[in-house]
Amino acid sequence: MRKHTRAALLCVAAALTLTACAAGKGGGADTGAAAAPGKDDKLTLTVWSNYSDRELEEVTKALKTFNKKFPNIEIKHEGSQDDDKITAGIRSGNTPDVALSFTTDNIGQFCSSGAFQPLKAYIDRDKVDLNQLSPAVQEYTEYKGNRCAMPMLTDVYAMYYNKDLLTNAGIANPPKTLDELYDAAVKATKKAPNGDIEVAGYLPTMGFYANRPTILAPTFGGVWEKDGKSNLAGSPGFTEMLTFQKKLVDFYGYDALERFRAGLGQEYSADHAFHQGKIAIMIDGEYRTAFLKAQAPQIKFGTAPFPTAKDVAYGTAFTTGTIMGIPKGAKNPGAAWELIKHLTFDTDTIVDLSNAIKNVPSTKAAMESPKLDVDEQFKTFIDLAKSDKLKGNPVTPIGDAHIKAVTDFSVSYQSGKVPDLAAGLKEVDKNIDDQIAKSGK
């Protein structure tokens, strides 16, 4: 299944400037709309993505449905191309016609540097109705009004719980509040006589699996920025998130948690801790439903919105997804746009691909399609995607450097290396603001 990677762009490195990042053989970024191909035009469209194995095959099938409209256009789909490779291709002039990125963390970098061409002229020309997409999806595909990408399926994050482990711990219903989550985590935890953790009710280690600030912050009401500045210290949600996680770290003991975590399987392997019944509650994306059914059919699991501190916030969820853009220097930008438009809005194509790789559809029409496979566990994510409580990534011109800064700080705080949380968050704010200022964007 698709991995929610957090790969940083090459141009985030200090040795590269944003101008160099966008520099390629195609000159400045195009702001006009290239003509669409004729129905019988013959050409080859090169598509880069980071898909592999079975998913690569399924996405290639989706790409091929474009040939119903343009039968003589050949689609050349190259997988295992991450953001670093896309950026390197743009800089060297070896550019695909369409680039797919697994992460929305770098959308600010793509749009502000010109690495992805602006799409406004195409959207205006073709009178595209962006309201077919949820507001959160619209937000994570543009930066400061510059739409340089479109979505191809969506990820939504929610709580997974092991029904047997909760029942055996005397917990009748999945937690909805943070107090209930803490209580369930404590009750469902099992320890050996020497104190080693055998089963964690909830694993609070930041940066492990999907336990990440970007994914958790929305459910705590964390607000990343205010008036154009980083706002971690000024947002009660970030303080509450880190305090709650630290409270659970202290319950387990940091060293005991680290020993337990060291013995757990990789996130995208059959040895994943939840698959092995070693974690009772976790947060993860909708794609995990397919992983569990394929790799751990013995696990009886349920899904629900992640617990929140306030009842009114229940149902809030983080969303991200695969994005598609026309890289700077693309040889066939007009045809590339037609392919992107097809993958974004053709309902049957979206539904078939969603059913194949178990990601949430990006459009409202696809989510309502009777052809969409929706079981009890997957329905949680569809319901969240239809709500008005979805929150996307914070978008900045420095790629995912701000996310890395917060994650690194969270790990340090949990380990006891940060004595003053408020002062530490202010320092992270300053670090992020300094990086953005230096970017010149």
Image (cartoon, helix red, strand yellow):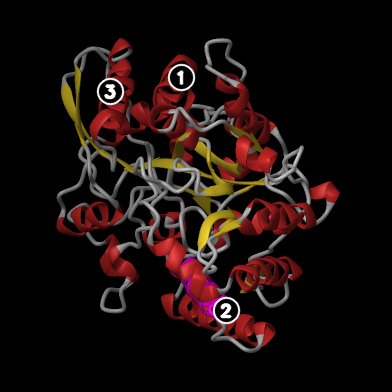
Residue at the outermost front position: 193
Tag 1 secondary structure: loop
| First of labels 1, 3 by sequence position | 3
Question: Mark 2 highlights which residue?
Answer: 413
In this rendered view, identify the residue nearer to me: 395 or 317. Answer: 317
Q: Tell me the amino acid under the disc marked 1.
A: Asp
| First of labels 2, 3 by sequence position | 3
For the point 39% across and 28% down, the residue is 294
Question: Mark 3 highlights which residue?
Answer: 37
Residue 407, horizontal then vertical, whole percent: 50, 69
Q: Separation of disc 2 and disc 3 at Cα?
A: 55 Å
Q: Tell me the amino acid under the disc marked 3.
A: Pro
Query: Would residue 357 appear left or right of 225 to someone viewing this image?
Result: left
What is the crowding at mark 2: few (fewer than 14 residues within 10 Å), some, or many (at least 20)? many
In the image, which residues are magenta?
A: 401-415
Contact (Cβ within 8 Å) of mark 2 with mark 3: no
Residue 142, horizontal then vertical, whole percent: 51, 49
For the point 15% across and 49% down, the residue is 94
Q: Separation of disc 2 and disc 1 at Cα?
A: 46 Å
Contact (Cβ within 8 Å) of mark 2 with mark 1: no
For the point 75% across and 56% down, the residue is 183
Tag 3 secondary structure: loop
Q: State the quadrant of the N terminus.
A: top left
* Vertical side of 437 occupied by 290: above or below: above
Question: Mark 1 highlights which residue?
Answer: 346
